[in-house]
Image (tube, helix red, strand yellow):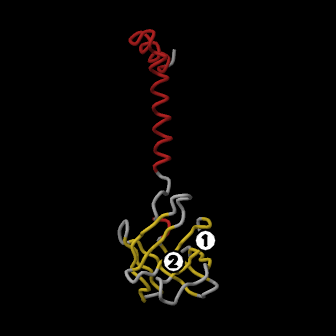
Amino acid sequence: MHNHQRFDIILKNILGEQYEKIVFTILALGFSLIVLSGCQTREDSSDWLQGDWYSKDWNVTYTIIMQNDDDWVIKDGEHTIARCSQEYTDENNKKEIELVSKKGTEFHITPIDKTHIKFQQVSKDGTLGTTDAVEFLKKQY
């Protein structure tokens, strides 16, 4: 008789009729923990936005840096374009992110896939500077 079979018999003797229910419950709990830990790694945050993004249309690379949960910096090389706060996430599809600079300029960012975004700069009312949405590609190093 193998060791695992002896262990099985000992457990059955100790736990009695409840043995199968207990084993099933333990397996179900283990499976639930695996599923829940998988859900926890989903990207519900905006972390994916951090990094270097290149636009072929504008021939520019922007670096987007999250300083904390709501504060962002958009840079063109060493030049800071804007310091922003994350004001809005589209509640309907939970994908569009709106960063708003202290001067009121809005940056609408919508993911296309894991490596592409649509980026649109919208100036506050009364100022020039609104752009068409352009596509940016995330640089991979």
Quarter of the picture containing the C terminus is bottom right
Instruction: Name the image quarter holding residue 68.
Output: bottom left
Q: Position of residue 130 (x, y in %)?
A: 55, 84
Q: CA distance from mark 2 to mark 1?
A: 11 Å
Question: Is 75 situated left or right of 116 in this image?
Answer: left
User: Circle 1 sits on which residue?
Assistant: 116
Q: Earlier in the sequence, mark 2 or mark 1?
A: 2
Identify whether 10 is placed above or below 109. above
Q: Residue furthest right?
A: 57
Between 12 and 97, the one lying in front of the other is: 97
Residue type, mark 1 in image = His
Identify whether 34 is placed above or below 117. above
Query: Which type of secondary structure does the marked residue at label 1 adopt?
Result: strand
User: Circle 2 sits on which residue?
Assistant: 52
Total labels drawn:
2
Which residue is found at the position 45% from the left and 73% from the top?
A: 99
Which residue is found at the position 51% from the left and 18% from the top?
A: 2
